[in-house]
């Protein structure tokens, strides 16, 4: 790449940082994913600046900067809510824990700094004064060929920092590049270092991977190289496992396709990835249909998803969301009654409904053959029916009942305690069947009868 970089692509804040450093007599370069993305014509998500200013100088130059990694020479300059990482040029150094260099060695040569970066396309620097591109490792050529190649000797680079192999898988998906064969071949022999990567980092990379158009590109790399056997062996149980006449794909490929088709945030796509994780353990052959069945795979899958999410340190909310979605992903709408729709909403939880629509559509699209309007029709009718039931505003939780615990205690002379909650639950069951019952006199009459039957009063 000999053309000069179009400096107008960098935001004013970046030019401001560079100018401030120049004022103080320091040199700086644009580096990292920002340069990579700008060169491939994609608006960069973030910009990094590398400089020969040392950490102390950086704090003097940017008194308000956040010292995000001062030992490694990194500060974060915040401008208009955007974060810019400014990092002192660093050279290569030894790694013995599989994640962090033993010592940080600051240097003055930008090429030495580029040499310690992970992939050639991430190891391009731009001189912000001239737009000159500094590309000692052929990153420009690899960008044009859409190849992800480690800087230097791939086995050495992956053996020093276990996160790099996971970043490789992620970039294969987010950039839609192919792995250079030597880089790909270096992953399996260096998995010992990959094992040292913290589960939080694995989770973060998974979540970043989910921003790709087709995250399956990354998960295929993880499967083929052995990374997934370390982080989520449960998913491998579906590899090569044929399904039934409704599916063109095996269980693994269906999970991949469902995730790719799933429109939504990263955690929802994790749920799509895991939605059929219970299938392999529930597969049984039916002599009646002469085909495979997967009874209960939604329940078994939810039980499996729980420890997977725990292991990857998803937050409690994220874990509950994934587990709920795996648990409830399966439904077969067939002109249900309003009461059946209300029961379904109560079971899955109102807050999960939008997720379940997205997941179900992805599940259908992930079956392998192009689906037509007929395949989608039951889902559309169900959505409409659920919307109608929600709009009616009928009771779906105990809080929606026309009486509360205090009313029951006062009117029925009942003592506080567990019995009150049980009674309210039973009233909700009755109101779910017939919303007309949701008014105080009717509910108190029903409650009196139930309490008498139970000998509560
Ligand atoms: P994105 O921000 O789109 O995820 P990025 O390439 O900018 O991608 P960052 O994590 O922001 O990734 O890192 C910025 C740069 O730092 C990278 O482009 C790369 O040059 C270098 N880098 C990041 N992580 C590593 C690593 N584990 N090993 C070597 N170099 C790394
Ligand atoms: Mg970045």
Image (tube, grey):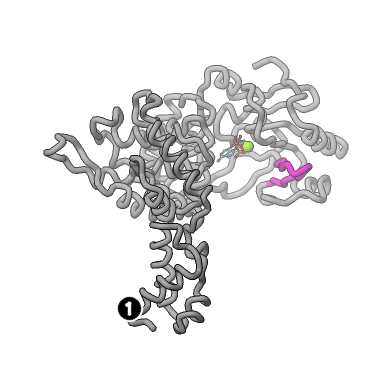
Check the image and report above or below for 435 versus 234.
below
Check the image and report above or below for 233 versus 397.
above
Residue 128: give x, y in percent of width and height: 77, 27
User: Can residue 236 be seen from the camera position used here?
Assistant: yes
Asked where in the image residue 374 lies, by quadrant, the reply is top left
Q: Please say whether residue 75 is one of the residues in the magenta stretch.
A: yes
Classify the position of ligand 1 by quadrant: top left, top right, bottom left or bottom right. top right
How many other residues sit within 10 Å of disc 1, few (<14), some (14-19) or many (≥20)? few
Q: Nearer the viewer, residue 453 or 291?
A: 453
Asked where in the image residue 218 lies, by quadrant, the reply is top left
Q: Main secondary structure of the magenta part?
A: strand
Q: Is mark 1 within 8 Å of ligand 1?
A: no
Asked whether, in this view, residue 240 is left or right of residue 350, the answer is left
Asked whether, in this view, residue 127 is left or right of residue 299, the answer is right
User: Can residue 87 be seen from the camera position used here?
Assistant: no
Residue ID at (15%, 40%): 286
Magenta part of the chain: 73-87
**Image quarter (top left, top right, bottom left or bottom right) of the C terminus:** bottom left
| Label 1: element kind | loop
Residue 343: give x, y in percent of width and height: 39, 54
**Image quarter (top left, top right, bottom left or bottom right) of the N terminus:** top right
Which residue matches tag 1? 454
Residue ID at (48%, 76%): 408
Asked whether, in this view, residue 126 is left or right of residue 283, the answer is right
Residue 3: give x, y in percent of width and height: 70, 15
Residue 225: give x, y in percent of width and height: 37, 35
Q: Please say whether residue 92 is one of the residues in the magenta stretch.
A: no
Single out the residue that lies furthest toward the right.
23
Single out the residue that lies furthest toward the left.
287
């Amino acid at each position: 790449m000999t053309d000069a970089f179009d400096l107008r692509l960098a935001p004013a804040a970046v030019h401001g940082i560079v100018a401030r450093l120049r004022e103080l007599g320091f040199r700086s370069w644009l580096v990292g994913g920002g340069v990579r993305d700008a060169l491939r014509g994609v608006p960069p998500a973030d910009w990094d600046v590398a400089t020969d200013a040392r950490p102390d100088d950086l704090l003097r130059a940017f008194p308000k900067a956040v010292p995000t990694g001062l030992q490694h020479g990194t500060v974060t300059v915040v401008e208009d809510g955007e974060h810019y990482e400014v990092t002192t040029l660093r050279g290569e150094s030894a790694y013995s824990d599989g994640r962090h260099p033993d010592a940080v060695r600051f240097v003055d040569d930008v090429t030495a700094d580029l040499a310690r970066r992970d992939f050639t396309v991430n190891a391009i620097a731009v001189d912000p004064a001239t737009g000159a591109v500094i590309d000692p490792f052929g990153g420009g050529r690899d960008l044009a060929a859409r190849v992800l190649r480690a800087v230097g000797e791939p086995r050495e680079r992956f053996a020093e920092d276990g996160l790099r192999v996971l970043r490789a898988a992620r970039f294969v998906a987010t950039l839609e590049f192919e792995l250079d064969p030597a880089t790909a071949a270096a992953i399996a022999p260096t998995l010992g270092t990959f094992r040292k990567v913290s589960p939080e980092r694995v989770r973060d990379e998974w979540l970043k991977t989910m921003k790709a158009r087709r995250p399956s590109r990354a998960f295929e790399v993880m499967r083929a190289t052995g990374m997934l056997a370390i982080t989520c062996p449960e998913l491998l149980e579906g590899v090569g496992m044929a399904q039934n006449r409704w599916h063109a794909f095996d269980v693994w490929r269906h999970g991949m396709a469902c995730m790719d088709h799933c429109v939504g945030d990263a955690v929802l796509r994790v749920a799509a990835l895991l939605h059929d994780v219970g299938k392999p353990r529930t597969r049984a052959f039916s002599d009646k249909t002469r085909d495979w069945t997967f009874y209960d795979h939604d329940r078994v899958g939810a039980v499996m998803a729980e420890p997977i999410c725990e292991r990857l340190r998803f937050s409690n909310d994220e874990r509950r969301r994934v587990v709920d979605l795996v648990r409830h992903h399966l439904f077969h709408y067939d002109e249900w009654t309003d009461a059946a729709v209300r029961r379904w909403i109560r079971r899955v939880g109102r807050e999960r409904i939008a997720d379940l629509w997205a997941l179900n559509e992805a599940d259908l699209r992930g079956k392998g053959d192009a689906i037509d309007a007929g395949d989608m029709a039951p889902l559309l009718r169900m959505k409409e029916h659920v919307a109608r039931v929600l709009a009616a505003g009928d009771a779906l939780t105990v809080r929606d009942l026309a009486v509360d615990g205090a009313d029951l205690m006062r009117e029925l002379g009942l003592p506080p305690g567990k019995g009150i909650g049980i009674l309210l639950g039973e009233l909700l069951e009755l109101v779910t069947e017939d919303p007309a019952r949701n008014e105080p006199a009717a509910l108190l009459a029903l409650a009196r009868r139930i309490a008498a039957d139970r000998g509560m009063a």
